[in-house]
Amino acid sequence: MAAQLFKGIIAYPITPFLPNDGTVDIPTLEKSIDRLIADDVHAIAPLGSTGESAYLTNDEWDSVAEASIKKVEKRVPVVVGISDLTTSNAVRRAQFAEKAGADAVMVLPISYWKLTEQEIFEHYAKIAKAINIPIMVYNNPATSGIDLTPTFIARMVREIDNVTMVKESTGDIQRMHTLHRLSNGDIPFYNGSNPLALEAFSAGATGWCTAAPNLISQLTIELYQATQAGELQKARDVFYKQLPVLEFILKGGLPTTIKAGLRLQGFEAGEPRSPLTPLTDAGVNDLQTLLKLVAN
Amino acid sequence: MAAQLFKGIIAYPITPFLPNDGTVDIPTLEKSIDRLIADDVHAIAPLGSTGESAYLTNDEWDSVAEASIKKVEKRVPVVVGISDLTTSNAVRRAQFAEKAGADAVMVLPISYWKLTEQEIFEHYAKIAKAINIPIMVYNNPATSGIDLTPTFIARMVREIDNVTMVKESTGDIQRMHTLHRLSNGDIPFYNGSNPLALEAFSAGATGWCTAAPNLISQLTIELYQATQAGELQKARDVFYKQLPVLEFILKGGLPTTIKAGLRLQGFEAGEPRSPLTPLTDAGVNDLQTLLKLVAN
Amino acid sequence: MAAQLFKGIIAYPITPFLPNDGTVDIPTLEKSIDRLIADDVHAIAPLGSTGESAYLTNDEWDSVAEASIKKVEKRVPVVVGISDLTTSNAVRRAQFAEKAGADAVMVLPISYWKLTEQEIFEHYAKIAKAINIPIMVYNNPATSGIDLTPTFIARMVREIDNVTMVKESTGDIQRMHTLHRLSNGDIPFYNGSNPLALEAFSAGATGWCTAAPNLISQLTIELYQATQAGELQKARDVFYKQLPVLEFILKGGLPTTIKAGLRLQGFEAGEPRSPLTPLTDAGVNDLQTLLKLVAN
Amino acid sequence: MAAQLFKGIIAYPITPFLPNDGTVDIPTLEKSIDRLIADDVHAIAPLGSTGESAYLTNDEWDSVAEASIKKVEKRVPVVVGISDLTTSNAVRRAQFAEKAGADAVMVLPISYWKLTEQEIFEHYAKIAKAINIPIMVYNNPATSGIDLTPTFIARMVREIDNVTMVKESTGDIQRMHTLHRLSNGDIPFYNGSNPLALEAFSAGATGWCTAAPNLISQLTIELYQATQAGELQKARDVFYKQLPVLEFILKGGLPTTIKAGLRLQGFEAGEPRSPLTPLTDAGVNDLQTLLKLVAN
C-alpha cells in the first residue's frame, strides 16, 4: 500500500535552469536528486511547488518527470506532482508519470475559477480512472485558491479508487485531527507546512513533504526519528533549532530561497523563472546567517 | 488617451467550444461579438476570465485574440486579457495583441507563487516595455491569489509608462476611494465586481467591465446612462432589477452561467472546459426564472 | 412610523468627562447636543459607541440618557443606545429610556460569548416585549464580535414587533442590497460606516448614523441633500471632500478623535475614559490639517 | 516564580446560579472547587470565561473571588481572572484578588473599542503597578476582539514587572513557536485552546488552562503526564479519545456545555445567565453520548 511506501521525509527537488537561456538543466537536476538520496531522505517528489512545475511548458514538464524518475532508480519511492489547470492535461501528465515509473502522483486542484466540490470530485475521479497508481490529494489553498475540507477529502478517499493519501499544507493542525477522526486514524496524512513539522508528527502524520532537505536534510531526518522514538524533548530541541530556517523558506517562497541556499552551499541551480526573482542580497545574508546557526 | 477611449459598458465575450471535440468555435465567437456590439456596448474585452483564457493553449489563445480583434473591426475599442503564469509568455501575448490591433491590454498578475511587490512591478514593467499600447492593471485576488493595494497600483501608474487604467474587482468600494484620493481623481478606475455596479458609478468609476451584457445588455447600459444623467432613483431601480442576475452569475462562475444563459436565449456556445462543468439543471431553472423576471 | 421619524443625519454626541475626577459632565453634554441641533442634524443618538456607553456605570448611563432626552426637548427625534452584556440590564435600560421619553432604542448584541442566532433572537424579543417604542437593530461585528446576517436581521424585523429599523456598520454595501431584496425595499436601513456614506445613500439608505457632525455637520448634511436631490456629481464632490476626515475618525476611534477634534474647535469635552487614551500629538496635528482642509 | 507555581492542568470552575432567582450560588461553587481539587488538577482559575465573569455585577464578582480563594485553602495555586472594560475597575479587581489571597491574576484586554498597543500596554502597566502578584497575559481575540501579537506580548513581559506568564487561546501553534523564539524559551506559555492540547504540550507549553476537568479531569491529567514522560503514542491515544469532548465544549460555549455536562454527571449548577441559554435537548443528548464514550 502506498501509505506504507511513503513515510518520513519526502523531499522536493528544485528544477534548475541554465543561466544563459533559462532552459531546464537536466544534469543539475539529476545531481540534486542524488544529493537528497545520499542524505537519506525517504522519498522524492519532483514537480511540486518547489519544482516550479506551474512555470514549465509541457515539454519541459515531461522531460523533468522522466529524468527524475529514471535518476532515482527505485532507490526510494517517487511521487510526481501532475497538477494542471485543465483536467485533460492533468490526466495526460498522470499517465505520463505512471508510464515513466512513478510510484504515485500528487494532485493539487489548481484552477483559475473556483470549483464546486462536484467539479473537484470529477477532476480527481477522471485522473484516478486514467491511471493505476495511487493519488495523494494535496490541499494548499494559499497557492491553489481552493480549500478542500477534511470532510470532502475523506469522502474522496472513500469513494475514488486510487485516492489513498492526503498532503495537508494549510498549517491548521485541526484539519489533521478531523482526518484522523473521520477515518478512525486510517487515512495516512502528510504535513506540507514546514513550521508545523513537530506538531504534525505529534498528531500522527505519516510523513513530512518538504523542500527543507535541500538545505538541512539531517535536521529534518532527526526530527522524524526523535518523534518516532518518543523522544519528545529531543524532537523539540531539533525542531526549534531548524524552525528559523523553515520559517524563512516558507516566507520567502520555496524556489527563491532554496535556490539561494543551494548556491550558498556551493550547489549552483540557477535562478527561479520570471515573474519570480532571485532572493535579494539582504535575504541572502539572512539565509546565510540562519544556515550557519543550524550547522553548529 | 486610453481612459477617454474606454468608458461605459466594457463587455466580456465567452470563448465558445465545439460540442463534438471541445475545440474553439471561432464562427460562434464572432457571432457573440456581433451580438454585443449590436446591443450597443461601449467596448469589447476578449480573453478575460469569462473567456476561459486560463484554460486555452497558446495556439487557441492566439486564434481567439486575432479573430476577436478582426471581428470588432474598430467599431468599438478592444482591450485584450494577456495574463499568463510566466512573464515571458505574458510579454509574447501582449505583443501579439498589439500587432493584431488591440487598443489596450489587461493584465492580472496570476502566479502560482505569491509574488513580492517588486516582482509584480517588474512583471508589469517588462510587459509595458515590450508594447506601445496602454495597460489596464487588473486586481482580482479571488482568482489570482494576489492582492494589489491601491497604493501599489497608483505607484505603477505613476512609474510605468503605458500603465494608465485600473480594473478593480475586489468589490471593496474603499479601494476606489483610495485610488481617487491618491491621484486627485486622475486615475481612471473600472469596476469589475458586478454587484457593485451602482455604487462604483456613484463613486466615479469610468466604466464597468462585465460579462452581464451577454444576457442583459440593455439593463447594464441603462444603469450607466442613469448614473451619468444624475437620475439616481432610476439608476437604483434598474440596478435592483438586475441585481439578482448579477449575483447569480458571480456566484455560479461566469463561463458556466453565461454559457447556460446564452443557451436559454437560443445562442449555443457549448460548455465550459473541464474541470469546469455545465450549470446543473436546478441552476438552469433558477437562471431562467431570473432572466424572465428582468425581461419584463 | 419610526422609519418616517428617523431619516437623514442621525448624530452621535460624545459623553464628556470632567478633567479633575473623570465623572460625567452633564452641562457640557447638554451644550454638545444643542450644538448639533443648531447645526440642523435630523436626529440625536446618545449612548452609542461614540458616547462611550460601554465604559459607563449604570448610574452614569441613567443620568446621560435622562439628560440627553430632556435637553433635546422633542426638537428632533431621539434614539438611545441601550446595549448591555446581560439581557436583564439591557431590558432595564430600554425601559428607562422609554420612560424618559426616547422615540426609539438601538440595540447591539454585545456579549462576551459568541451567541447563537436563537440566543440573539431571544435577547431582542425580551427587550422588545418590555417596551412600546421601536428598536433599531445594530450590526457592528468589529466592536460587538457578533455578526448578524441580513437574512437573520430581516427575520427579526418580520417576527418581533417593535423591531423596525436596521443600522448596518460593516461597511459591506452588499448587506444593504440583501436587506433591500429580502423586503422588497420595505426595511429601512441606516448606514453606520462613515466611509460608505455616499454609496449607502446611492443604494437607498434612509439615514446615516454618524459622529462626524460633531466636527463637520454641514458637509454631512450637504451629502444627504445632494443624494436626495439626485445631484450625483455634487454628492461625489462633497463626499470626497470630507472622506479624509471620515477615514481618520474611523481609524483613530470615535471617542478619541471626536473629543480631540472638538477641542480643536474650542469645545472642551475632556478625555476618553481609560483604557482609551487621548489622541497623540501627531494625531492632533493630522486632524487639525484635515479639518482646515474641509473648512475651505 | 509564578511559572514554577503554575504548571500542568489549570482548571476553570463555573459560576453556579440559583434556579429560583438566578443569584450566585456560593455553596455549589465551593463544592465544584472541591471536586476539581479532589480530581488532582494542578491549579484553580476562578472568574475566567467559563465562570461567566463578564456577566457578573461587581458585588457578585467580589463574592465569587473571595469564596473561591478561601475554599482552595492554598491546596493548589489560584489565578483569578480580573478583566474588565475600564482600567479603573480592572485595577480594583486585581487589588481585591491580591488582598483575598490570589497567587496571580489573569488579564484579558477586553474593550468595546479596539485599543492601540500603547493603550493595551498602559492598561497592563497600571494593573501591574497596583499589585505585587504576577500577571498572566491572556490572548483570546475570539472573545475580546483584540489580538496581542507574540512580539507585543514578549515586550510586555520584558518591560512590565509582574507580567510573567502568557495564556494563548488563538489555537495557532505558531504563536507559541514565536514566543519561544523571542525569549529563547524563557517565557512560560499556557495553552487555552482545548483542541490544541496535545500539540501545545509537544511545543513546550507549561500548562493547559481548561474547563474540561469539570467533566473529564482524568483524561486531561493523563495527557499532561504522558507528554511529560515522553510517551508520545499514549499521549496521542488519550488526546484523540477526549478530542470529541474538547471540540464539543469549544463549539457549544463553555458555560453552556460545562453546566449541561455537570448536570449529566449529577452535579447541579444551574443555567448560564441570559443572553446565554441552556444547551438544547439535542445538544444534551450529543454530550451524553460523548461523555459515555470517554468513560470507557
Image: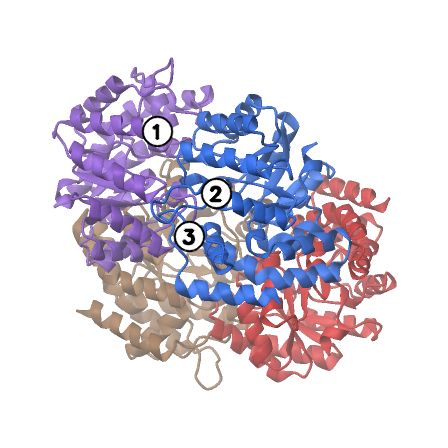
Chain colours: A red, B brown, C purple, D blue
**SS class, disc 3:** loop
Tell me what residue is drawn at x 65 percent, y 83 percent: A131
Work out whether residue C205 can be spotted: no
Work out whether residue A38 can be spotted: yes
Establish if C144 lies above or below A40.
above
Mark 2–mark 1 CB contact (< 8 Å): no
Establish if C291 lies above or below C167.
above
Residue A234 position in % (x across, y down): 81, 51
Establish if C58 lies above or below D23.
above
Mark in the foreground, 2 or 1? 2
Rounded to the nearest whole Å, what is the CA distance between mark 3 and mark 2?
Answer: 57 Å
Q: Please give left or right for residue A173 compared with residue D53 in the image.
A: right
- How many marks are shown on the rendered structure? 3
**Which quadrant of the structure image shows residue D25?**
top left
Q: Please give left or right for residue B245 compared with residue D167 in the image.
A: left
Dot 2 corresponds to which residue?
A: D27
Chain of the residue that carries numbered disc 2 in the rendered image: D
- Three-letter amino acid code at disc 3? Thr
Mark in the foreground, 1 or 3? 1
Dot 3 corresponds to which residue?
A: B170
**SS class, disc 2:** helix
Tell me what residue is drawn at x 63 percent, y 64 percent: D241
